[in-house]
Amino acid sequence: MDFNKNDIEYYLLTKEYNSLTKEELAFVSDTIVSEAEYNSLRQLLLVMEEAPVEELLEPNPQIKEDLVIDFEKARWQKGAAAASTAKVIPLKEERKHKKNGLFWLSIAASLALLIGLYMSKDSFFNSSDNQMAQLEQKVVKETKTPKLEVEKQEETAVPFEDSNELEAAIVEEKTNTASQSSPIITQRNELMTNKDNKIAAGQTPTIEDADVLLEEDDLAEETITIGSANGKRDNYSLDQELSNDASNTFSSAEVVVADKILEKELALVAVDGEVSQDKNSKLTTSVKESVSLKGDKELIDLLYTAL
Amino acid sequence: MKLAKQAYSTYTDEQLMDEVVKGNSRAFTELYERYSKPMLNYFYKMLWQDKLKAEDFMQELFTKIIQKPHLFNSKLRFKTWIFSIANNMCKNEYRKQEVRKDSNNDLHDNMAINDGSDNQIKKVDESLFNDRLKEELKELSVSHREVFILRFKQGLSLKEIAEVLDVSEGTVKSRVFYTLKKLSASLKEFNPITVSLLLLLGIS
């Protein structure tokens, strides 16, 4: 028996009661109340110490062999069980985990979607508004640009911006060509100058003058129709017309010129019509787009309120 | 092989038990070597010096360790754990014997008488004191007997006994000294002088 100084047995076996120090006596006194008791316990422990040591029993070696076999069996069974459970139980657990994972993933995704929608709501609708505004601007531009193109075409085709200028130019050209090329026109010019002189002198014009006046009115009407038609006329065609006029009589030439001008004006009107048709189609498409965007916006509003 | 055996001999009981949990049979063999003899003798002393019963109990104890090694708490000491299992097995056996005693008209007493009488005849010369002590121990209650055996036969400290029996250290201390006082009173004639005289006279 091994005892240390923290055990009363140590003092009982090593010291007599009288040889105990004050500290040791105080320690022993917690359990042993008297010297007689101390001595009787000391005698017992000394006898137990001095008594012949009992022979310890030796275990049967067969027990060890049996136990080792049992251990191997148990290990094999545990291994098999572990293998089987590893195949079956984790699958169930995995499913559970998967379910949980999907559940939480779906919640996270829906939350993210909601937050995203909430955060981008204003910017999204602003962007759609911007798109709308851009489209509107585009529409306005498109409505403006064809006009500009037409104007440009007009500028390139006719250097005269004003219809009055054009009128004056035509009249001037007519007079020039008539004076230069046709004797009838020269005669007419002479008559006209005579008439003008007579008017200036306060005299009444004659019948010949009246014819001249009638022709002058026709020319005025012709120029008015040209100005109101707002059409295109190039110098080449005008020269051609005037040259044709020169080859015919004065009145018939003017009629032919007026017809041709009318035809060209009709052609111009047709061109304008085509341009306007293009414009209309573009406008309708843009309006359709804006309408569809508005519809989308309404749908998004509905979705947001539903969420 | 020899190296492995030497390595396991340096392991603590707790380390060996961890290996047993992992399924290491060599670790189990090492633990068996360390504790088979003390446990057999503990059962022998606790269970009426019946060697066959002690062997059966010892085998059953190690079988329990094989089957449920995970029940070992590595925070505790293996020594106290295995003694606590053995002590519980003994208590269960006492209960069984109590039932049999009531039904079979004092079987336990007959067993004790037979075993004690044989020992007295055989070993009267060698260990008169031990025989008397055994007899006196049988008279003690289970709680005092187990404390006495654990303290003076198995060499456990008061703290370890407290862990094994799951009681306070103060309770163990009071039980130890109660048993000592009772034995000293009953074995009064066996003081060192008396024993020496008996040995000199050749009576024992």
Image (spheres, coloured by chain):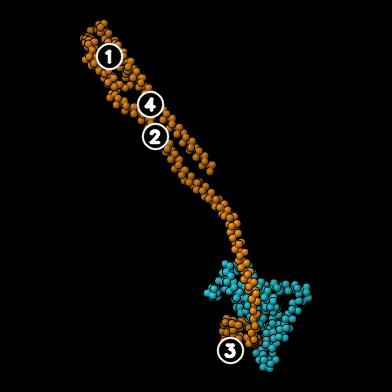
Amino acid identity at mark 1 = Asp
Binning the other alpha carbons within 10 Å of mark 4 as few (below 14), some (14 to 19) or many (20 upward) gives some
Image spot of residue A38 (x, y percent): 63, 86
Q: Looking at this view, is B62 or A205 the one in front?
A: B62
User: Label 2 is found on which chain of the structure?
Assistant: A
Marks 3, 2: nearer the viewer: 2
Q: Sequence order check: which comes first, mark 3 or mark 4?
A: 3
The reply, left or right, for residue A289 in relation to residue B186 is left
Marks 4, 1: nearer the viewer: 1
Distance from disc 2 to disc 1, alpha carbons, whole Å, reads 50 Å
Is residue B170 something one can see in this rendering? no
Marks 2, 1: nearer the viewer: 1
State the residue position of label 3.
Answer: A19
Amino acid identity at mark 3 = Ser
Image spot of residue A68 (x, y percent): 62, 71
Residue lying farthest to the front in this orientation: B1
State the residue position of label 4.
Answer: A275
Marks 3 and 2: same chain? yes
Query: Are the residues at dot 3 and dot 4 in contact (C-beta closer than 8 Å)?
Result: no
Q: Colour of chain A?
A: orange
Image spot of residue A84 (x, y percent): 60, 59
What element does badge 4 sit on?
helix
